[in-house]
Structure formats: C-alpha cells, structure tokens
Image (tube, coloured by chain):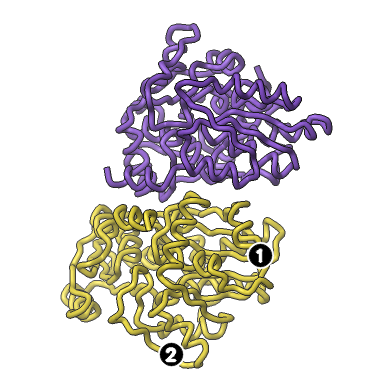
Chain colours: A yellow, B purple
Amino acid sequence: MIELSDILQAQERIKGAAVRTPLIESADLNALAGRRVLVKPENLQRTGSFKFRGAFNRLSQLDDVQRKAGVVAWSSGNHAQGIAASAQILGIHAAIVMPADAPATKVENTKAYGAEIVFYDRYTEDREEIGRALCKERGAVLVPSYDDLDIIAGQGTTGQEIAEDVRALGVTLDAALICCGGGGLIAGSATALKAANPDTDVFAVEPEGYDDHARSLVSGQVEAADTSQPSICDALLAPCPGKLTYPINSALLTGGLVVTEDEVQHAMRMAFRVLKLVVEPGGSVALAALLSGKLDPCHETVAIVLSGGNVDPEVFAKTLAA
Amino acid sequence: MIELSDILQAQERIKGAAVRTPLIESADLNALAGRRVLVKPENLQRTGSFKFRGAFNRLSQLDDVQRKAGVVAWSSGNHAQGIAASAQILGIHAAIVMPADAPATKVENTKAYGAEIVFYDRYTEDREEIGRALCKERGAVLVPSYDDLDIIAGQGTTGQEIAEDVRALGVTLDAALICCGGGGLIAGSATALKAANPDTDVFAVEPEGYDDHARSLVSGQVEAADTSQPSICDALLAPCPGKLTYPINSALLTGGLVVTEDEVQHAMRMAFRVLKLVVEPGGSVALAALLSGKLDPCHETVAIVLSGGNVDPEVFAKTLAA
C-alpha cells in the first residue's frame, strides 16, 4: 500500500519536469454523456502519457552509483518513453526492451529521447528474461512499469491533481473512470481520490479480453488475461493484476468496466470530433465506457482519464475513416 | 479602438459559458522550436474555436426586442458555430449564411446547435447581400464576424487569459503569434497583451494568398486579398483587413508572417504528433510560422494561439498521410 504522503512527495519531485495537466470540460461532451464530465488529458503530459510521472519519480531517487550503472525497463511504449525522457533529463543510460510490433511512434520517440532499444518477439520470447539478463550483465536497475511503489505514487499524482482541481471547482466527484493495464495509474490515483473523498467510486476500465481486473474484483482473487489475444489497446496488455497494485485496487475500487474495440474506436473519433484531442486506443477506454453507457446515471459528476496520445498516424487515420 | 476595460467586461459576460482554456507547454515542442513556446489551445474552446467568445459577448447584450427578432450572421463555420451555440444558450433564433462548400463538420455542428442555415455559392453569390436581405425581412440583428467592437472585445479575452497566465508563470512574453482573417481575434488579443506588456511583439499570421494584413502593415494602407484563390485555411479567407480591426492592428502589431499550405499541413501533423491536439488548417498557421523559422530567434518566449479544431476527419486523415 501507499499513503497520500507518498503521492504528495512524488508531486514535489516531478514538479517542473512533468506537466501539471489541466482538468478540462466540454459542454458538448456533457450533453452526449448526460452528465458532467471532467476530463484529465494525460495525452498532454510530457512524452504523451501519464507514464512520465512514475518514471521521473522513480529515477530521480536513484543514487549516484545506480545512475552510473543505468536503468533497464520493458514496455510496449509509454513506460518506455517515460523512462527514456526521465533518464535523458537526469543523465542516466536507459535500455528498453520493446516488442518488435510496438507502435512505430512509440519506438521512434523512445529512440529520440536517447534510449537504447532491445527488440523482442512478443509471441516467442520472454521480455522479463531479456530485461533481467541485461540488468545482471550491467549491474543496472530494473524499473518495473507498475509493480513498484514509487511508480504507483508517481502515477497517483494524476489522481491527486484531479482531486485538487475538483476541490477548486467546488464540485463533488461521484465517480472516476481510469484505464487499467497493470493497475499502477489507478492504484495511485484511487489512493489520492479516496483520500480526498471516500465517497468517490473509482472504476477500472479495461479492453475486452484483458478484463483481468474486472474479473479479479468480482471473484476476489487474481485472475489472468488471455494474452494470446490481440487488442488495439497496446498500452493495456498486462497479463494480470500486479502483486503490489492488486491489493491496493481490490481495497479501493468499486468495480471494473469492460469495453469493446468498436467502443474504443468510437471514443477515439469522439475525442477527435468533440474534444479535439488525439487519444490512443488504450487511452480512450474510460471515454469509451462513459459513451457506451457502462456507468450508472446516478454518477452525475464523473472524472475520466485520457491516459495517452501516442498513436501512429496510419492507425488514427484508419480509425477516423471507420 | 477598444480599451482593456471592454475586454475585462467581456470576460465577466462569457464566464461560465466559455471555457477558460489553459496555457500549455510541451518540452518536445520547445526543443523543436528552439525556444519556450506557450500554447493557447482555443480548439478546446466551446464550439471548437475562439469564435464563441465574441459571439457570446455580443449576443448576451441584446435587449428583449432584439432577442425576439433573432440574429443573422455569415460565416464559413467557426463564427457560425459560435453564434449558433450562443443563440441556443440564450434562447435566440439564429440564421447563418454559409458557403455551400463549408467543411461538413462545421455545417453539421451549426445545425446541431439549432441554427437555421442558408447556403450560398461562394463564387457566384454575395453572402452579405443575402444576409442583409434576411435581416431586413425579419427585423433581425446582423452579427459581423470581426468588424464589431463587442466581437473584438470578446475575442480579446483570449489574449487577456494569455497575459494573466504568463504573469502567473512569472514569465516575460517576447512575442505572440496569432492567426488573422478579418483581424478580430488579433485586434482584441493585441489590446490585452500590449496593456499587460508593451514590449511584447504581436505578429499576425496569414496563409499565402490571403496575406492582406501583412501587406497592409508594410504599405500603411488597406490592401485586399485575391479571394479567387483557394486555400485550405477556410477560417482565414476574409477579403481585406476590417474597418474597425485594421486601425487597431496597424497601431499595435509589429508585423505579419505568411505561411504556405505545406507549412500549415506540417504544423497540423506536428500538433498531432507532439501536442496531441486536433487543429484545423486555419488554426495551425501560428504554429506553422514558428516551426518554419519565420520568427527571429531573439524572441525567446513566445505565445501561439491554436485558434480552432473544426476539421473534417477526411481532411485530417489526408493531412496525416501527406
């Protein structure tokens, strides 16, 4: 578990490096959703996703010996960019193990932030094995993408900023919809949101096939996803709830919502048309859950996190045309 | 001319109806532009462009008799949406004269806000004649898109918000790049920005072919655009500087910058890739001027207005692929 104080300390560490993203509202979206929707656009975050928050919080705490040895991470792309950009700012060498079929935009950006990229085959190789071997060989520090308390606290600054802005608006937040892969963003954010208002219901949103949190929250035990299935939500393909994230999430979350690929693509088009925001598939699931009527109307004021915007132009253009 | 007090009054009138858009910053954009860039994303404004500000400021001041008689406006789409949405909120009937080839998104949205649309042929008919005839017939109030002091003051709230946010950041603004069609947005915004800091250089940015302000500012007299030429910047096709806007702009602006269609499309792609924002062609000219090196490097801290995001999905997809 983490405490609110861990998140507040993370907030101090990332200040100036991370973007304090705004909480935005659209009259047209409110009309479409039939309630008040407060949007946290983490696609506007440095590196195009919330992942920079956790990465910078973690890396900025490394000591001199660790900084010299460098860091290793595995990621389909958003954690990769968060680690690479943080490492670049702090002058640390970063090696990232990425799937060969990761979105080109994510690979290019990770390279542009100066990281070394090690590709692997998602279906035949084990990224954790490759990453651990690299760490051993170099004495480097492994930085997990969600199962790490500093990562969770860093991502939790997202929820803390929502809580602060909601308070400034004088609004009571009935619910928050937050996407969920390994569960780091929602674990940290739920900690902050529940500390601000224990009555806010926090829901995990997952793409179909990767609804391991939704099923785990129902069964009360950790359920795995069938990772052999493809999904357009490349950012949310964690195999199961995390060892550190799940205890937090099972204690704090009200439940899980699951969206289809059609619902995700519709949400991406509505983000384009109504919000004028570029949101990647995995970043759109909370909006998708809202627009497809997955949330009870009793939740009148709802925050949603658009977690990232790193989508290849070809994929985006195809989604607009669909 | 208008005074800062007109803008501050407009700010009070539009409060709660208009979005107080944030001033955002991207480390990646700063690196690309070689300076600090503060982005005012008016694509996040209600109706997807800054035009709502002026429209609501104007319409909210109509008396009961005028409200009953309704309003008439002509516009290729952003002023249309601003007027339609403002009229809907205030319970006023709005008739909008729109070119038959206006972007489908703009036509659909204007309809969705409940306005009556009267189409005309851009090349064979005179929209002003059609609009004035409608006004006469109905006793309706004509609401110009830029040559009106309340419209100018309303659009000026954009510049005022930039000035406020720049002050809160403790930053000195060396320059502001603002798109320019009829010149209402820049006239109002320059009034606010110059009141906050007389040393801020304000530049009008126009698409090639429609560089009437740039040429007028050089020659010292009102020069006309050749409106027979097509341009992807449908929002910026005013025939010449306005009767009310030009005296303000000639007094306050440092000069005009002109961008090509290629530079505009590149800027739209960079807004997608780096900023994760959907920006329409006319809304991208300030970013285009910055990224194509049109602004002297001595301007180290620069604000740019992204004025709107109402672009058809087909046009956006085509631009991404180009």
**Looking at the picture, which amino acid does disc 2 mark?**
Val
Do the residues at discs 1 and 2 belong to one chain? Answer: yes
State whether residue A90 appears in this view.
no
Residue drawn 66% across and 67% down? A173
**Cα distance, mark 1 to mark 2?**
30 Å
Q: Say which residue label 2 marks.
A: A222
**Looking at the picture, which amino acid does disc 1 mark?**
Thr
Q: Quadrant of the C terminus of chain A?
A: bottom left
Mark 1 secondary-structure assignment: strand
Which is more toward the observer, A54 or A252? A252
Residue B87 drawn above or below residue A40: above
Residue drawn 56% across and 17% down? B242
Q: Say which residue label 1 marks.
A: A301
* Residue A65 position in % (x across, y down): 27, 68
Count residues near mark 2 (Cα–Cα under 10 Å), then give few for <14, some for 14-19, many for 20+.
some
Q: Earlier in the sequence, mark 1 or mark 2?
A: 2
Residue drawn 38% across and 32% down? B232
Which is more toward the observer, B179 or A11? B179
Which is more toward the observer, A10 or A287? A287
The label shown at residue A92 is none
Which dot, 1 or 2, sits closer to the camera?
Answer: 1
Which is more toward the observer, B45 or A93? B45
Instruction: Tell me which chain the residue with mark 2 is part of.
Output: A
Mark 2 secondary-structure assignment: loop
